[in-house]
Image (cartoon, helix red, strand yellow):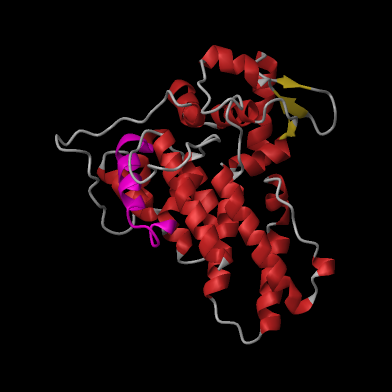
Protein backbone atom coordinates (compact mmCIF):
# COMPACT_ATOMS: atom_id res chain seq x y z
CA UNK A 1 0.00 0.00 0.00
CA UNK A 2 1.13 3.54 -0.75
CA UNK A 3 0.64 4.70 2.83
CA UNK A 4 2.83 1.86 4.13
CA UNK A 5 5.55 2.83 1.68
CA UNK A 6 5.28 6.44 2.85
CA UNK A 7 5.41 5.53 6.53
CA UNK A 8 8.45 3.29 6.02
CA UNK A 9 10.23 6.02 4.07
CA UNK A 10 9.51 8.59 6.76
CA UNK A 11 10.83 6.28 9.48
CA UNK A 12 14.04 5.74 7.50
CA UNK A 13 14.35 9.49 7.06
CA UNK A 14 13.99 10.03 10.80
CA UNK A 15 16.78 7.56 11.52
CA UNK A 16 19.09 9.22 9.00
CA UNK A 17 18.41 12.62 10.53
CA UNK A 18 19.02 11.40 14.07
CA UNK A 19 22.29 9.91 12.86
CA UNK A 20 23.26 13.29 11.38
CA UNK A 21 22.74 14.87 14.81
CA UNK A 22 25.00 12.30 16.43
CA UNK A 23 22.40 9.84 17.63
CA UNK A 24 23.20 6.21 16.90
CA UNK A 25 20.58 3.59 16.20
CA UNK A 26 18.99 1.89 13.22
CA UNK A 27 20.39 4.01 10.41
CA UNK A 28 23.03 1.42 9.52
CA UNK A 29 22.80 0.44 5.88
CA UNK A 30 20.92 3.62 4.94
CA UNK A 31 22.28 6.48 2.88
CA UNK A 32 23.52 9.44 4.96
CA UNK A 33 21.16 12.36 5.39
CA UNK A 34 21.52 14.70 2.41
CA UNK A 35 19.53 17.69 3.69
CA UNK A 36 19.56 20.08 6.62
CA UNK A 37 17.87 18.64 9.69
CA UNK A 38 14.93 20.55 11.15
CA UNK A 39 15.03 19.41 14.81
CA UNK A 40 11.47 20.44 15.69
CA UNK A 41 9.95 18.74 12.65
CA UNK A 42 12.05 15.67 13.47
CA UNK A 43 10.78 15.60 17.06
CA UNK A 44 7.14 15.96 16.05
CA UNK A 45 7.32 13.32 13.32
CA UNK A 46 9.40 10.87 15.36
CA UNK A 47 6.94 11.20 18.24
CA UNK A 48 4.13 10.14 15.91
CA UNK A 49 6.08 7.41 14.12
CA UNK A 50 7.19 5.90 17.42
CA UNK A 51 3.88 4.02 17.26
CA UNK A 52 5.26 2.22 14.18
CA UNK A 53 8.90 1.97 15.33
CA UNK A 54 9.21 2.15 19.15
CA UNK A 55 13.00 2.46 18.90
CA UNK A 56 12.53 6.07 17.83
CA UNK A 57 11.58 6.71 21.44
CA UNK A 58 15.20 6.11 22.44
CA UNK A 59 16.40 8.83 20.06
CA UNK A 60 13.76 11.21 21.35
CA UNK A 61 14.81 10.54 24.94
CA UNK A 62 18.47 11.04 23.99
CA UNK A 63 17.71 14.39 22.38
CA UNK A 64 15.63 15.41 25.39
CA UNK A 65 18.77 14.89 27.45
CA UNK A 66 21.37 16.51 25.19
CA UNK A 67 19.51 18.84 22.84
CA UNK A 68 16.31 20.12 24.44
CA UNK A 69 17.94 23.41 25.46
CA UNK A 70 18.72 24.05 21.78
CA UNK A 71 15.22 23.16 20.63
CA UNK A 72 12.35 25.62 20.23
CA UNK A 73 9.29 24.83 22.33
CA UNK A 74 7.21 27.26 20.27
CA UNK A 75 8.17 25.70 16.93
CA UNK A 76 7.31 22.21 18.20
CA UNK A 77 3.95 23.48 19.42
CA UNK A 78 3.24 25.25 16.12
CA UNK A 79 4.12 22.26 13.95
CA UNK A 80 2.24 19.81 16.17
CA UNK A 81 -0.86 22.02 16.25
CA UNK A 82 -1.51 21.27 12.57
CA UNK A 83 -1.69 17.51 13.23
CA UNK A 84 -4.92 15.63 13.92
CA UNK A 85 -5.71 14.36 17.42
CA UNK A 86 -4.31 12.39 19.18
CA UNK A 87 -1.08 12.70 17.17
CA UNK A 88 -0.97 16.44 17.89
CA UNK A 89 -0.06 15.62 21.50
CA UNK A 90 2.47 12.84 20.86
CA UNK A 91 5.41 15.24 21.36
CA UNK A 92 4.43 15.86 24.98
CA UNK A 93 6.26 12.69 26.05
CA UNK A 94 9.41 14.34 24.69
CA UNK A 95 8.53 17.38 26.78
CA UNK A 96 8.28 15.13 29.85
CA UNK A 97 11.75 13.77 29.17
CA UNK A 98 13.20 17.22 28.52
CA UNK A 99 11.76 18.51 31.80
CA UNK A 100 13.04 15.44 33.66
CA UNK A 101 16.54 16.05 32.30
CA UNK A 102 16.49 19.61 33.56
CA UNK A 103 15.28 21.84 30.72
CA UNK A 104 12.58 23.78 32.55
CA UNK A 105 11.01 25.44 29.50
CA UNK A 106 9.38 22.11 28.60
CA UNK A 107 7.82 21.44 32.00
CA UNK A 108 4.51 23.20 31.29
CA UNK A 109 3.97 20.97 28.25
CA UNK A 110 4.92 17.64 29.81
CA UNK A 111 2.40 14.84 29.62
CA UNK A 112 2.73 11.20 30.55
CA UNK A 113 5.55 9.26 32.16
CA UNK A 114 9.04 10.17 31.07
CA UNK A 115 11.22 7.32 29.86
CA UNK A 116 14.91 6.77 30.50
CA UNK A 117 17.22 6.82 27.50
CA UNK A 118 19.88 4.18 27.03
CA UNK A 119 23.15 6.12 26.98
CA UNK A 120 25.71 3.34 26.95
CA UNK A 121 27.46 1.11 29.42
CA UNK A 122 29.00 3.89 31.49
CA UNK A 123 25.79 5.90 31.61
CA UNK A 124 27.27 8.83 29.72
CA UNK A 125 25.19 10.78 27.24
CA UNK A 126 26.62 11.07 23.74
CA UNK A 127 26.70 14.75 22.80
CA UNK A 128 25.04 16.13 19.71
CA UNK A 129 27.23 16.25 16.61
CA UNK A 130 28.06 19.70 15.30
CA UNK A 131 30.52 18.62 12.60
CA UNK A 132 28.16 16.99 10.12
CA UNK A 133 26.84 19.44 7.58
CA UNK A 134 23.14 18.46 7.93
CA UNK A 135 23.25 19.56 11.59
CA UNK A 136 23.79 23.21 10.59
CA UNK A 137 20.50 24.47 12.06
CA UNK A 138 21.46 23.13 15.49
CA UNK A 139 25.04 24.33 15.12
CA UNK A 140 23.91 27.90 14.48
CA UNK A 141 21.69 27.74 17.56
CA UNK A 142 24.65 26.70 19.68
CA UNK A 143 26.48 29.76 18.36
CA UNK A 144 23.70 32.37 18.31
CA UNK A 145 20.87 30.96 20.41
CA UNK A 146 17.45 29.52 19.64
CA UNK A 147 15.84 32.33 17.69
CA UNK A 148 14.41 33.26 14.32
CA UNK A 149 17.67 34.78 13.07
CA UNK A 150 19.63 31.56 13.57
CA UNK A 151 16.91 29.59 11.82
CA UNK A 152 16.56 32.08 8.98
CA UNK A 153 20.28 31.94 8.32
CA UNK A 154 20.10 28.13 8.14
CA UNK A 155 17.17 28.40 5.72
CA UNK A 156 18.97 30.83 3.43
CA UNK A 157 22.26 28.93 3.47
CA UNK A 158 20.37 25.75 2.64
CA UNK A 159 18.47 27.50 -0.16
CA UNK A 160 21.73 28.25 -2.03
CA UNK A 161 21.00 31.71 -3.37
CA UNK A 162 17.27 31.25 -3.88
CA UNK A 163 15.42 34.47 -3.13
CA UNK A 164 12.85 34.08 -0.37
CA UNK A 165 10.24 36.50 0.97
CA UNK A 166 9.38 36.92 4.64
CA UNK A 167 6.06 35.18 4.02
CA UNK A 168 7.79 32.19 2.47
CA UNK A 169 10.35 32.11 5.28
CA UNK A 170 7.59 32.13 7.90
CA UNK A 171 6.06 29.01 6.36
CA UNK A 172 9.39 27.20 6.31
CA UNK A 173 10.26 28.24 9.86
CA UNK A 174 6.80 27.81 11.42
CA UNK A 175 6.78 31.36 12.76
CA UNK A 176 4.77 34.50 12.08
CA UNK A 177 5.46 36.58 8.98
CA UNK A 178 6.21 39.63 11.14
CA UNK A 179 8.81 37.65 13.11
CA UNK A 180 10.49 36.45 9.93
CA UNK A 181 10.45 39.94 8.44
CA UNK A 182 12.03 41.58 11.50
CA UNK A 183 14.75 38.95 11.59
CA UNK A 184 15.44 39.24 7.87
CA UNK A 185 15.57 43.04 7.89
CA UNK A 186 17.97 43.11 10.84
CA UNK A 187 20.25 40.54 9.21
CA UNK A 188 20.17 42.37 5.88
CA UNK A 189 21.17 45.61 7.60
CA UNK A 190 24.05 43.80 9.27
CA UNK A 191 25.27 42.53 5.91
CA UNK A 192 25.00 38.85 6.85
CA UNK A 193 22.39 38.29 4.15
CA UNK A 194 21.34 40.21 1.06
CA UNK A 195 18.03 41.79 0.10
CA UNK A 196 16.51 43.78 -2.75
CA UNK A 197 14.04 46.62 -3.06
CA UNK A 198 11.25 44.63 -4.67
CA UNK A 199 7.85 44.30 -3.06
CA UNK A 200 7.64 42.01 -1.28
CA UNK A 201 11.32 42.19 -0.32
CA UNK A 202 13.37 39.11 -1.14
CA UNK A 203 16.28 37.81 0.93
CA UNK A 204 19.11 35.45 0.05
CA UNK A 205 22.73 34.47 0.64
CA UNK A 206 25.32 32.42 -1.22
CA UNK A 207 25.85 29.07 0.48
CA UNK A 208 29.33 28.63 -0.99
CA UNK A 209 30.61 31.58 1.04
CA UNK A 210 29.22 30.08 4.23
CA UNK A 211 30.58 26.66 3.36
CA UNK A 212 34.09 28.09 3.54
CA UNK A 213 33.47 30.10 6.71
CA UNK A 214 31.73 27.27 8.56
CA UNK A 215 33.97 24.57 7.08
CA UNK A 216 30.94 22.55 6.12
CA UNK A 217 31.79 19.00 5.16
CA UNK A 218 28.93 18.11 2.84
CA UNK A 219 27.82 14.44 2.83
CA UNK A 220 28.34 14.25 -0.93
CA UNK A 221 29.69 16.27 -3.82
CA UNK A 222 26.36 18.10 -4.09
CA UNK A 223 27.65 21.00 -2.02
CA UNK A 224 26.05 22.37 1.12
CA UNK A 225 23.04 20.25 2.17
CA UNK A 226 19.83 21.81 0.92
CA UNK A 227 16.94 23.06 2.99
CA UNK A 228 13.96 20.74 2.88
CA UNK A 229 10.48 21.81 4.06
CA UNK A 230 10.25 19.00 6.62
CA UNK A 231 7.90 20.94 8.89
CA UNK A 232 5.47 21.55 6.00
CA UNK A 233 5.32 17.97 4.75
CA UNK A 234 5.18 16.14 8.09
CA UNK A 235 1.61 17.31 8.86
CA UNK A 236 0.47 16.12 5.43
CA UNK A 237 2.00 12.71 6.11
CA UNK A 238 0.24 12.37 9.46
CA UNK A 239 -3.10 13.47 8.03
CA UNK A 240 -2.67 11.03 5.12
CA UNK A 241 -2.06 8.21 7.59
CA UNK A 242 -5.22 9.18 9.47
CA UNK A 243 -7.13 9.28 6.17
CA UNK A 244 -5.96 5.77 5.32
CA UNK A 245 -7.00 4.40 8.73
CA UNK A 246 -10.46 5.94 8.58
CA UNK A 247 -13.54 3.99 7.55
CA UNK A 248 -15.45 5.80 4.81
CA UNK A 249 -19.15 5.17 4.02
CA UNK A 250 -18.41 5.15 0.30
CA UNK A 251 -15.55 5.28 -2.19
CA UNK A 252 -16.77 8.69 -3.27
CA UNK A 253 -16.45 10.14 0.24
CA UNK A 254 -13.02 8.56 0.58
CA UNK A 255 -11.87 10.23 -2.63
CA UNK A 256 -13.50 13.50 -1.59
CA UNK A 257 -11.60 13.49 1.71
CA UNK A 258 -8.35 12.80 -0.14
CA UNK A 259 -8.97 15.73 -2.45
CA UNK A 260 -9.75 18.01 0.48
CA UNK A 261 -6.49 16.98 2.13
CA UNK A 262 -4.63 17.61 -1.12
CA UNK A 263 -6.16 21.07 -1.47
CA UNK A 264 -5.21 21.96 2.10
CA UNK A 265 -1.55 21.04 1.64
CA UNK A 266 -1.11 21.84 -2.03
CA UNK A 267 1.18 24.84 -1.50
CA UNK A 268 3.28 22.85 0.98
CA UNK A 269 3.63 19.97 -1.47
CA UNK A 270 4.59 22.45 -4.18
CA UNK A 271 7.29 23.86 -1.90
CA UNK A 272 8.83 20.39 -1.83
CA UNK A 273 9.07 20.34 -5.62
CA UNK A 274 6.71 17.40 -5.98
CA UNK A 275 4.91 16.57 -9.22
CA UNK A 276 1.29 17.09 -8.20
CA UNK A 277 -1.79 15.43 -9.69
CA UNK A 278 -4.30 17.47 -11.68
CA UNK A 279 -7.68 17.13 -9.92
CA UNK A 280 -9.44 18.06 -13.17
CA UNK A 281 -8.13 14.85 -14.71
CA UNK A 282 -9.07 12.67 -11.75
CA UNK A 283 -12.64 13.51 -10.86
CA UNK A 284 -14.78 11.72 -8.33
CA UNK A 285 -13.57 8.33 -7.15
CA UNK A 286 -10.67 8.42 -9.62
CA UNK A 287 -8.83 10.86 -7.36
CA UNK A 288 -8.07 8.07 -4.87
CA UNK A 289 -5.66 6.46 -7.34
CA UNK A 290 -4.06 9.82 -8.12
CA UNK A 291 -3.67 10.45 -4.40
CA UNK A 292 -2.00 7.05 -3.93
CA UNK A 293 0.52 7.99 -6.62
CA UNK A 294 1.18 11.25 -4.78
CA UNK A 295 1.85 9.34 -1.56
CA UNK A 296 4.46 7.25 -3.37
CA UNK A 297 6.08 10.43 -4.67
CA UNK A 298 6.20 11.85 -1.14
CA UNK A 299 7.79 8.57 0.02
CA UNK A 300 10.49 8.98 -2.64
CA UNK A 301 10.97 12.58 -1.48
CA UNK A 302 11.61 11.41 2.08
CA UNK A 303 14.10 8.80 0.92
CA UNK A 304 15.96 11.34 -1.23
CA UNK A 305 16.52 13.64 1.74
The location of residue 241, given as percent across then percent down, is 54, 66
Q: Is 206 a magenta residue?
A: no
Q: Is residue 198 above or below residue 265?
A: above
Q: Which of 165 and 130 is in front in this view?
A: 130
Give the x, y percent position of residue 215.
51, 15
Query: Is residue 83 among the parts visible in the rendering?
Result: no
Please identify the quadrant where the N terminus is shown.
bottom right
> At 26% across and 57% down in the image, what residue appears?
113
Residue appearing at x 61%, y 35% in the figure: 227
Q: In this view, does 122 lie to the left or right of 6?
A: left
Residue 184 picture quarter: top right
Camera-side residue of 140 and 229: 229
Number of numbered discs visible in the structure rendering:
0
Q: In this view, does 117 lie to the left or right of 14?
A: left
**Main secondary structure along the magenta-highlighted residues:** helix
- Residue 229, compared with residue 87, is above or below; it is above
Relative to residue 2, is residue 50 drawn left or right? left
Nearest to the observer: residue 249 or residue 187: 249
Residue 111 appears in the figure? yes
* Residues drawn in magenta: 49-68
Q: Which residue lies furthest to the left in this view?
A: 122
Q: Quadrant of the C terminus?
A: top right
Instruction: Kindly identify the residue that appears in the image at 68 percent across and 51 percent down.
Output: 268
Q: Where is residue 161 in the image (x, y as percent from the top left)?
A: 71, 25
- In the picture as drawn, the residue positioned furthest to the bottom comes out as 249
Q: Is residue 72 above or below residue 237?
A: above
Residue 242 percent location from the top left of the image: 53, 69
Q: Is residue 53 magenta?
A: yes
On screen, residue 84 versus residue 265, left or right, reads left
Amino acid sequence: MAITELTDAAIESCWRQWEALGGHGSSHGLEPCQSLVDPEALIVLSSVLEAFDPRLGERLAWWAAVGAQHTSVQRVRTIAASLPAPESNAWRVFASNAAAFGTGSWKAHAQGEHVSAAFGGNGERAAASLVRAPSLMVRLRYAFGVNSKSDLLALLIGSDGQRITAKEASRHLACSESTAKRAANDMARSGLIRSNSQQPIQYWTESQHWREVLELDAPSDRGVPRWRPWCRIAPFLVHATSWERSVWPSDYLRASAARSLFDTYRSDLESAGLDLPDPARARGEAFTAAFATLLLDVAAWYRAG
